[in-house]
Structures are given as C-alpha cells and as structure tokens.
Image (cartoon, rainbow, N blue to C red):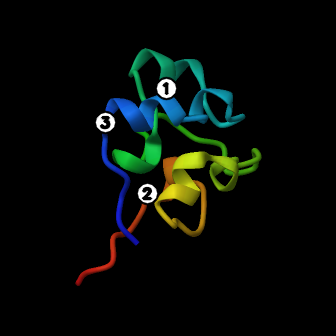
Amino acid sequence: MKKPENNQDNFSGCICLDCSLFTSCNQKKNEKLFCARKKSDCEMDSQKMCICGMCPIYSENELSGGYFCINEIVEEKA
C-alpha cells in the first residue's frame, strides 16, 4: 500500500471535512487528507465513525484499513 500524494487533485476529492472525527483542532491545523500526511496532531476519538472507506482517494489508491488520522498509513516496502 502506498500513501496517496499530497496534492491539490487529492485535496479536491478529499472527504475528511465530512468525517465525524474531523474537529475544530484539525481545521485550525489545516489537517486535511489525513491519509496522505501523517496521523493527526489533534486528539482523535476512535469511538466515532471512520469514513475512510467511502473516500474516492481510498479506492483510487487501493488502500485498506481505516482511521488513518489515528493510525496513519503504513507503506509497504518494495
């Protein structure tokens, strides 16, 4: 699994802003497209519903798993 690129095309398709885990802290830190960056610097509530699997970036990049804002994507080494 490879992390999606951190670019404007991916930002345009990003649904992180609609995620129940997205908070005012994330907004202040301009954290968007968690899966292409690093896990969030903000406190995240793992009891809330993750929507990573519904994201077009998720399917386009053949990702698996979820809660990337908490866990981060672990890239496979070639």
Q: Residue at x 35, y 29 (%)?
A: 8
Residue 16, percent across and down? 58, 35
Kind of residue at badge 1: Asn
Earlier residue among tags 1 and 3: 3
Question: Mark 3 and mark 1 in contact (Cβ < 8 Å)?
Answer: no
Q: For marks 1 and 2, give the CA distance.
A: 15 Å
Residue tagged 2: 72
Mark 1 or 3, closer to the camera: 3
Q: Residue at x 60, y 60 (%)?
A: 66
31 relative to 43, above or below: above
Kind of residue at badge 3: Asn
68 relative to 76, above or below: above
Q: For marks 1 and 3, give the CA distance.
A: 18 Å
- Residues 48 and 78: in front is 78
Q: Which corner quadrant holds the N terminus?
A: bottom left
Residue tagged 3: 7
Q: Which corner quadrant holds the C terminus?
A: bottom left
Residue 33, percent across and down? 46, 38
Residue 12, percent across and down? 48, 28
Task: Decide: few, some or many residues near mark 2? Use Cα within 10 Å; few <14, some 14-19, many ≥20.
Answer: some
78 relative to 22, above or below: below
Q: Secondary structure at mark 3?
A: loop
Q: Secondary structure at mark 1?
A: helix
Task: Decide: few, some or many residues near mark 1? Use Cα within 10 Å; few <14, some 14-19, many ≥20.
Answer: many
Residue tagged 1: 26
Q: Farthest residue in the left direction? A: 78
Task: Decide: few, some or many residues near mark 3? Use Cα within 10 Å; few <14, some 14-19, many ≥20.
Answer: few
**Label disc, if present, on residue 36 of the rendered structure:** none
Q: For marks 3 and 2, give the CA distance.
A: 17 Å
Q: Residue at x 76, y 47 (%)?
A: 49
